[in-house]
Amino acid sequence: MTDHFDGSILTPDGWVMGRITHGTRINAVEGDPTRAPRPPYILPGFVDCHVHGGGGADMMEGAEAIRTAARLHARHGTTAFCPTSVTAPTEDLDSFLDAVAAVMADPPQDGARVLGAHLEGPFINPDKLGAQPPFARHADVTQLKAWAERAPIRIMTLAPEEEDGGALLDALAAAGIRAQLGHSLCDYAQARAALERGAGVTHLFNAMSTLAHRGNGLCGAAFAHADYAEIIPDLVHVEAGAILAARRAIPNLYGVTDATGGAGMPDGSYRLGSLDVEKANGAMRLPDGTLAGSALTMDAALRNLVDIGLPLDEAARRLSTIPADWLGLTDIGRLAPGTRADIVVLDETLTLTRVIAGGHDISRTR
């Protein structure tokens, strides 16, 4: 079956005013280039590399929780994502990875596609947990290899000071897993060494050694040397000015939600792994007030980035094309013939009106 949309289409070469036709993949983009796009806006589906839950479900709870989160985030424009763990005991991470594999084998037809797991820890600094449960441990390459046999792992967040001589980075590179630095108290030199080996950065500014004019740490090294870094544009984790500063410094800064079970849900109590978290005033927090993931969805992230001054095309690419590029995936995150038909359509207020995932109209399953 072939379907189509008419409007301002964001292609890899810029805006085109015309028509996009698709089945499960995009068949054609026809029209004329324009520098003055007008609604409806037709954008690539969002790619979220860091998401812990949504719709009341926490990823650590099993396959059905991942499917629930996949459905919630699809309704907000995410068409592909990496379910993300918290730091946890080995048996809990085994179960999480088994659940990821199960959902990849039997995905929900009305949800975002699972690309593979993001292991946030457990090889992080126990003194920089943020809202991570207290199960951090020193890097273990043998354990990593065992986990990689259970399910595809796309990303691992680690603290470089918790590994020996780069062995974990070597193992991740050999397995095709993206290394990201986070939950770390590493110094500038340690961070620079890992970044120069191709590592990215997890939720820039949050849970890391600082950016400063003396005593620089991971954040400062990221500004100086990172090519890719994720940031949470909920305007709670990072204020607007800091996002704009990072955008000038890091070429491939991209947005993630870091969403928890509270995303898409009313205020109240939710879970983040083994922790109780509370949603109030648009934020997720531990009882002591520490930020604990977010309640963000990608459509809200798009509007936030536009509100702080990014052009719509740039904001969209930082939520779709750039994260896809980081994962090495060229068939998502862009609208071009032959790519997956992952499409979002927005009106003049940047409100979603249609979501297409792999050619399937999510909008009609609400």
Image (tube, helix red, strand yellow):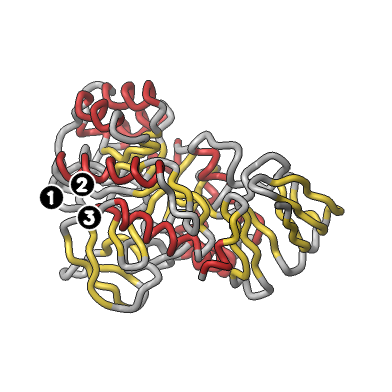
Residue in the picture at 86% in, 53% down: 32
Residue in the picture at 38% in, 59% down: 69
Q: Nearer the viewer, residue 250 or 212?
A: 250
Q: In this figure, which residue is indicated by the disc labeled 3?
A: 130
| Amino acid under disc 1 | Pro
Q: Nearer the viewer, residue 154 or 316?
A: 154
Query: How many residues crowd mark 1 within 10 Å: few (<14), some (14–19), many (20+)?
Result: some
The reply to whether dot 1 and dot 3 touch (C-beta < 8 Å) is no
Q: Depth-wise, is mark 2 or mark 3 nearer the camera?
A: 2
Q: Which mark is residue 134?
A: 1
The reply to whether dot 1 and dot 2 touch (C-beta < 8 Å) is yes
- Give the percent coordinates (x, y) of residue 246: 48, 51
Q: Is residue 102 left or right of residue 304?
A: left
Residue in the picture at 81% in, 59% down: 17
Query: How many residues crowd mark 2 within 10 Å: few (<14), some (14–19), many (20+)?
Result: many
Q: Is residue 79 left or right of residue 268?
A: right
Q: Quadrant of residue 54?
A: bottom left
Q: In this figure, which residue is indicated by the disc labeled 2?
A: 87
Q: Is residue 284 left or right of residue 203?
A: left
